[in-house]
């Protein structure tokens, strides 16, 4: 079972003294969870917002995870459904501290327009700081252009939304430290994701914890090196036992594709056995019919004897 920390405990432990102390905003949408206990400024919690992959599974939203440090919310990837999951997790719906995109595959970025525009309509007034591979600026520019009708109507119509509230400040990154502020450091780690030219994992170091989020990757030495001894390793996975050619044109290439682009449960077990994270969380789960027990068995077969959980949307670690 995933380690689900009750909301009350989370709020008492780490969220969020900076949020406005109202339970419902003018648009009748909850914006925060009230607490009478002080938040710990530097406490760090990983909130899974989507453990799915391209297949639209109602129980596993598109790839996204938040690392919440005190009142700051760092979002990693923006898969489809991200804003609904942010709301369900009682995270701010009017913007995040910073967004980090691992790579530009659609399953990791379909929620980007949702994040940009929904956070604006829910009250964002300053630019969204977005970090990611080269091409993120062009993608963002096209998104802002594509929703021009909406922008004009909301600014010049009766809603009177702030004119620059949908702005995005894009930082196209290279490997290394890409963010370092207030005790939180985010490092981009180049990973191997098939024929994609640029894909990153991220390591997040806070005053209290270290977290690595793999993004999409086949086994990558740089990622293994960056993951050694971390508190939480959030890693993509597929079932090695279920991998087989698919009955469709080109389907015979499916196992080859998976080897080039992704990491199996057994491979992940080998990686984790060397990296020795205190907790391994499986995400971007390509089950192909496998159960949680099957996936854990695969990780164990790879040699990892430590703590491992199959990620769930809205679970907190
Ligand atoms: Zn993906
Ligand atoms: Zn991908």
Image (cartoon, rainbow, N blue to C red):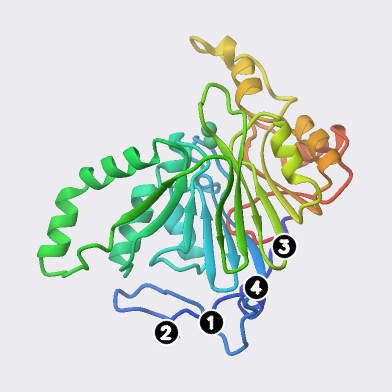
Compare marks 1 and 4 and give the one earlier in the sequence.
1
Disc 4 from disc 2: Cα separation: 23 Å
Residue at image coords 50%, 69%: 90
- Residue under label 1: 17
Residue 217 in the image: state x and y as whole percent.
Answer: 62, 32
Evaluate if marks 4 and 3 touch, with contact meaning CB atoms under 8 Å apart.
no
Tag in front: 1 or 3: 3
Label whose residue precedes the other's in the sequence (4 or 3):
4
Q: What distance separates the C-alpha of mark 1 from that of mark 2?
A: 12 Å
Instruction: Tell us which disc is closer to us: 2 or 3.
Output: 3
228 or 154, which is in the foreground? 228
Secondary structure found at label 4: loop
Label 1 – label 3 distance at C-alpha = 20 Å
- Crowd rating for badge 3 (residues with CA inside 10 Å; few <14, some 14–19, many 20+): some
User: In the displayed structure, does residue 229 sit left or right of residue 47?
Assistant: right
Picture quadrant of residue 20: bottom left
Query: Dot 4 corresponds to which residue?
Result: 42
Mark 1 or mark 4, whichever is nearer to me: 4
Q: Secondary structure at mark 1?
A: loop
**Callout 4: few (<14), some (14-19), or many (20+) C-alpha neighbours within 10 Å?**
many
Q: Quadrant of residue 109?
A: top left
Task: Classify mark 3: helix, strand or loop.
Answer: loop
Measured in 3D between alpha carbons, the distance from the residue under mark 4 to the one under mark 3, in whole angstroms, is 9 Å
Residue annotated with mark 2: 22
The answer to whether the residue bearing label 3 lies less than 8 angstroms from the nearest atom of ligand 1 is no
- Sooner in the amino-acid sequence: mark 1 or mark 2: 1
Label of residue 209 in the image: 3
Residue drawn 65% across and 34% down?
Answer: 287
Disc 2 C-beta below 8 A from ligand 1:
no
Is label 4 or label 2 in front? 4
Quadrant that contains the C terminus: bottom right
Q: x, y (%) of residue 80?
A: 43, 46
């Amino acid at each position: 079972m995933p380690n689900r920390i009750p909301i009350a405990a989370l709020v008492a432990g780490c969220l969020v003294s900076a949020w406005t102390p109202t339970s419902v905003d003018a648009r009748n949408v909850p914006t925060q969870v009230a607490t009478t206990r002080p938040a710990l400024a530097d406490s760090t919690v990983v909130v899974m917002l989507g453990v799915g992959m391209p297949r639209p599974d109602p129980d596993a939203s598109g790839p996204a995870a938040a690392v919440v440090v005190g009142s700051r919310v760092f979002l990693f990837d923006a898969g489809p459904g991200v804003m609904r999951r942010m709301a369900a997790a009682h995270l701010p719906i009017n913007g995040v501290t910073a967004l980090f995109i691992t790579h530009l595959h659609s399953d990791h970025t379909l929620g980007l327009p949702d994040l940009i525009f929904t956070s604006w309509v829910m009250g964002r007034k300053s630019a969204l700081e977005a970090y990611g591979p080269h091409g993120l600026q062009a993608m963002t520019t096209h998104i802002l252009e594509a929703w021009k009708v909406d922008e004009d109507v909301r600014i010049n119509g009766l809603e009177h939304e702030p004119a620059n509230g949908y702005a995005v400040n894009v930082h196209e990154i290279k490997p290394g430290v890409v963010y370092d502020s207030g005790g939180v450091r985010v490092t981009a780690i180049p990973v191997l994701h098939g024929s994609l030219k640029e894909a990153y994992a991220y390591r997040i170091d806070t005053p209290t914890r270290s977290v690595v989020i793999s993004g999409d990757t086949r086994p990558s030495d740089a990622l293994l090196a960056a993951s050694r001894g971390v508190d939480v390793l959030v890693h993509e996975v597929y079932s090695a036992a279920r991998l087989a050619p698919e009955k469709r044109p080109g389907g015979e290439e499916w196992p080859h594709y998976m080897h080039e682009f992704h990491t199996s449960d057994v491979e992940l077990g080998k990686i984790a056995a060397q990296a020795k994270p205190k907790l391994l969380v499986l995400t971007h789960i390509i089950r192909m019919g496998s159960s949680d027990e099957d996936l854990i068995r695969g990780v164990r077969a790879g040699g990892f004897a430590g703590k491992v959980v199959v990620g769930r949307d809205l679970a907190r670690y």
